[in-house]
Amino acid sequence: MTRRILIGAIAALMSAGVATASWYDDYNAGIAAVRKGQWAVVIQKMTAAINANPKENDNARTYGNIFINYHPYYYRGLAHLRTGKYEEAVKDFETTSGPGEIDRGSIDELMQDAKAKLAAASTPEPQPAQPQPQPQPVPQPTRPAIDPALRQRAATAIEQAKQRLGAAQQRKATASPQYSQALQAITSANTQFGAAKTNEDLTAVIAAADNAMLLADSATAPATATTAPPTKTTSVTDIVLGATTRRVRVALEAYFRGDFDDASRGFQKLSQDLPKNG
């Protein structure tokens, strides 16, 4: 009975020794993976070591009197940083107390690097700018071509109208209403010719110039009034009537002076002489 108890105790101690040694084996395998840059293996082995022994120690005991610098969070955080798991890296760097036998940077440096990359990864990528619709050019209406021959006809018509106006000036017809109307028509034709953009505009210019020519041709100088010389009959009549008028005036003056006798004799004499003059 005592022998069985002793064997069981020895087996239990051996099992405990194996179980205690397992975290060290994982940690040691993780350190080897760090040297090789096998970051997935580092995460796996350091996680297993942490599960068995979560407390870091600068002087952790393994077998008997063997002690190691045990910092699994440092190396797992380093592996997380190298594999882009920045949030997990920050947590491990906040937990660890420093590097173990392999120093890959201070905790502050690695923490700053992890936080910077975490912030950059959390920032949404800028969306490409949406293309702005380009304004479509508005088609301009095509202007009808102007006939060069028609333009020449319009210019010729204007020159002819100016010549007709000059002729009216020589006839001294500038005071006539037709001349004024012709001048207005040629002015309008000149203005329209300068702004003409279509054949219809040039046709209107020709019509205005033709109208100016017609008006200029019809403009005439005002007629001079002439006085006909008096005829002989008219002169004799004026002489007779002039004498009678004087006799009537003399008789009237006598009457208004109160010389009624003289006035009466004058009127009587006139009444006797007038039938004889008839």
Image: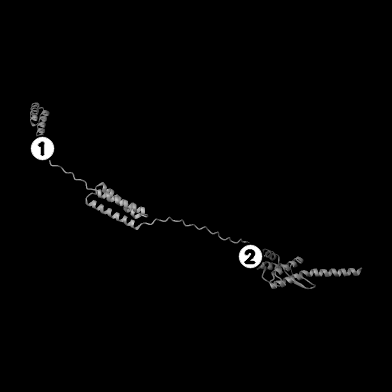
Q: Seen in the image, is 163 located left or right of residue 238?
A: right
Front label number (1 vs 2) = 1
- Mark 1: give few (<14), some (14-19) or many (20+) Cα within 10 Å: few
Q: CA distance from mark 1 to mark 2?
A: 139 Å
* Residue 84, image x, y percentages: 66, 66
Q: Amino acid at mark 2?
A: Lys
* Residue 29, image x, y percentages: 74, 71
Q: Which residue is mark 2?
A: 117
Number of on-image labels: 2
Residue 97 seen anywhere in this rendered image of the structure:
no
Q: Of the residues under marks 1 and 2, which one precedes in the sequence?
A: 2
Q: Nearer the viewer, residue 228 or 253?
A: 228
Residue at (26%, 47%) from the top-left corner?
178
**198 relative to 18, above or below:** above
Report which quarter residue 73 is drawn in: bottom right
Report which quarter residue 142 is drawn in: bottom left
Q: Amino acid at mark 1?
A: Thr
Q: Nearer the viewer, residue 159 or 33?
A: 159
Question: Disc 1 on helix, strand or loop?
Answer: helix
Q: How is the image coloured?
A: one colour
Residue at (79%, 69%) from the top-left corner?
20
* Residue 228, image x, y percentages: 14, 42
Q: Which residue is mark 1?
A: 233
Q: Quadrant of the C terminus?
A: top left
Q: Nearer the viewer, residue 133 or 126?
A: 133
Q: Quadrant of the N terminus?
A: bottom right
